[in-house]
């Protein structure tokens, strides 16, 4: 596995762990809607399992897909009037890291494998 792919997987796993941790926000006063938090948690688990199986066919595509869908689930915070200001910053950072992870995974899986 090349270094680009390793870094992309590490970022994706970190994002997956944050998605799982986000499920705790369901019980917070200013937390996200339950459906979004639980959906994000499920996508986090999918990301981590697929990353653990990175050597198998289709696993990297699954990581990329789960991260893309998770990023889309974060976008409604920008239109929610009752969302706290800090959440927009956190989602913005997560979106930037997601774009970086997807780019690294896409480039890394197409790179020639070291001998």
Image (tube, rainbow, N blue to C red):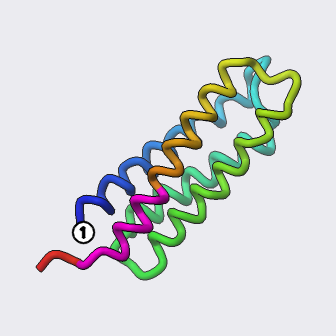
Q: Is residue 33 magenta?
A: no
Residue 52 drawn above or below residue 85? below
Foreground pick, 44 / 1: 1
Q: Residue at x 62, y 54 (%)?
A: 43
Left or right of 80, for residue 37: left
Image coords of residue 27 (percent x, y): 74, 25
Quadrant in the rendering for residue 24: top right
Q: How many marks?
A: 1
Q: Is residue 109 magenta?
A: yes
Residue 29 drawn above or below residue 49? above
Residue found at the far right of this picture: 81
Q: Residue at x 47, y 61 (%)?
A: 49
**Which quadrant would the N terminus be assigned to in this image?**
bottom left
Image coords of residue 69 (percent x, y): 67, 57
Left or right of 98, for residue 35: right
**Which quadrant would the C terminus be assigned to in this image?**
bottom left
Residue 91 drawn above or below residue 112? above
User: Badge 1 is on which residue?
Assistant: 1
Q: Residues within 10 Å of mark 1 (few under 14, many from 20)?
A: few
Left or right of 68, for residue 53: left
Q: Residue at x 84, y 34 (%)?
A: 79
Q: Residue at x 24, y 59 (%)?
A: 3
Quadrant in the rendering for residue 91: top right
Foreground pick, 68 / 32: 68
Image coords of residue 83 (percent x, y): 79, 24
Left or right of 53, for residue 27: right
Instruction: Identify the magenta region.
Output: 102-112
| Disc 1 element | loop
Q: Main secondary structure of the magenta part?
A: helix
């Amino acid at each position: 596995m090349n270094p680009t792919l390793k870094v992309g997987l590490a970022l994706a796993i970190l994002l997956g762990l944050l998605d799982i941790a986000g499920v705790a926000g369901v019980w917070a006063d200013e937390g996200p809607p339950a459906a979004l938090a639980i959906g994000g948690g499920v996508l986090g688990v999918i990301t981590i399992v697929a990353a653990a199986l990175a050597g198998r066919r289709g696993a990297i595509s699954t990581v990329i897909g789960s991260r893309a869908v998770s990023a889309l689930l974060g976008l409604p915070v920008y239109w929610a009037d009752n969302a706290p200001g800090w959440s927009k910053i956190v989602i913005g950072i997560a979106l930037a890291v997601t774009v970086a992870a997807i780019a690294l995974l896409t480039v890394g899986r197409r790179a020639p494998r070291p001998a």
